[in-house]
Image (cartoon, rainbow, N blue to C red):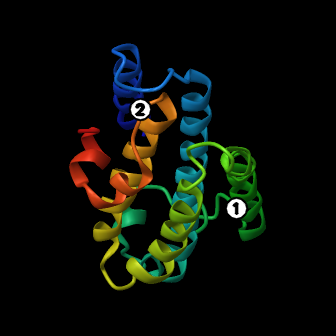
């Protein structure tokens, strides 16, 4: 995640320094990165919870044969896991509220709906990878550049893939 956001934030900084963007906003870029990390980690935990009830139920689940599943393997109880999820989500919730009056405000409803619909709708229908394009493009890459000061319009992030991913 950091390896994805780092170059985008750098691109926004370079555009800003070259006079093709607004003033560089390193504080906003840092807050944005922490926010995305919190939501991404929360989503992974939520996904683990759902997997426990679905495909990881099987005794020969690929996931538990070759990786760790804290719930299924009994490292955490459901109550402990829910507590971890809440603590991981807390920074994201707080920072999302903080960012609502910044140029990053429009990312919140898009990101939260992506989070909700990925686990509940898209993943069970095997369309999760389709949604990933929209999450990694406009949401993370595009708004990562906006956080760094790049002069991108929110509508461009959702209508032009080159703008969303590369800031062109």
Image vertical order of residue 95 relative to residue 14, above or below: below
- Determine whether the residue tagged by mark 1 lies in a helix, strand or loop: helix
The image's mark for residue 81 is 1
Residue 101 in picture, x, y percent from top left: 69, 47
Query: Quadrant location of residue 16?
Result: top left
- Against 69, residue 152 (above or below) is above
Q: Of circles 2 and 1, which is in front?
A: 2
- Name the mark on residue 150: 2
User: Which residue appears at 69% of the width and 58% of the height?
Assistant: 85
Q: Quadrant of the C terminus?
A: top left
Q: Which residue is located at x 27 percent, y 46 percent?
A: 163
Q: Earlier in the sequence, mark 2 or mark 1?
A: 1
Using the image as rendered, state which of residue 44 and residue 12 is in the foreground: 12
Residue 120 in the image: above or below residue 11: below
Q: Nearer the viewer, residue 135 or 69?
A: 135
Q: Say how many tags the image has.
A: 2
Mark 2 neighbour class, 10 Å CA radius: few under 14, some 14 to 19, many 20 or more: many
Q: Is residue 79 above or below residue 19?
A: below
Q: Is residue 66 visible?
A: no
What x and y, as percent, mark residue 155?
39, 57
User: Which residue is nearer to you in this view: 135 or 161?
Assistant: 161
Residue density around tag 1, few if under 14, some if 14–19, many if 20 or more, within 10 Å: some
Q: Residue at x 55, y 56 (%)?
A: 106
Split into 4 quadrants, where in the image is the N terminus?
top left
Residue 166 appears left or right of 23: left
**Left or right of residue 144, residue 107 in this image:** right
Compare residues 85 and 53 and report the one nearer the observer. Answer: 85
In screen coordinates, is 119 left or right of 34? left
Question: Residue 110 — which label?
Answer: none
């Amino acid at each position: 995640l950091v390896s994805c956001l780092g170059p985008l934030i750098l691109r926004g900084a370079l555009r800003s320094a070259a006079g093709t963007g607004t003033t560089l906003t390193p504080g906003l870029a840092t807050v944005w990165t922490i926010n995305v990390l919190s939501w991404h980690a929360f989503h992974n935990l939520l996904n683990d919870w759902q997997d426990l009830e679905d495909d990881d139920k099987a005794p020969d689940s690929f996931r538990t044969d070759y990786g760790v599943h804290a719930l299924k393997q009994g490292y955490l109880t459901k109550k402990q896991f829910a507590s971890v999820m809440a603590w991981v989500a807390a920074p994201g919730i707080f920072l999302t509220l903080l960012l609502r009056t910044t140029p990053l405000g429009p990312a919140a409803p898009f990101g939260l709906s992506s989070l909700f619909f990925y686990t509940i709708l898209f993943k069970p229908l095997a369309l999760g990878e389709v949604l990933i394009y929209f999450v990694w493009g406009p949401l993370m890459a595009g708004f990562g550049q906006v956080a760094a000061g790049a002069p991108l319009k929110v509508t461009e992030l959702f209508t032009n893939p080159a703008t969303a991913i590369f800031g062109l």
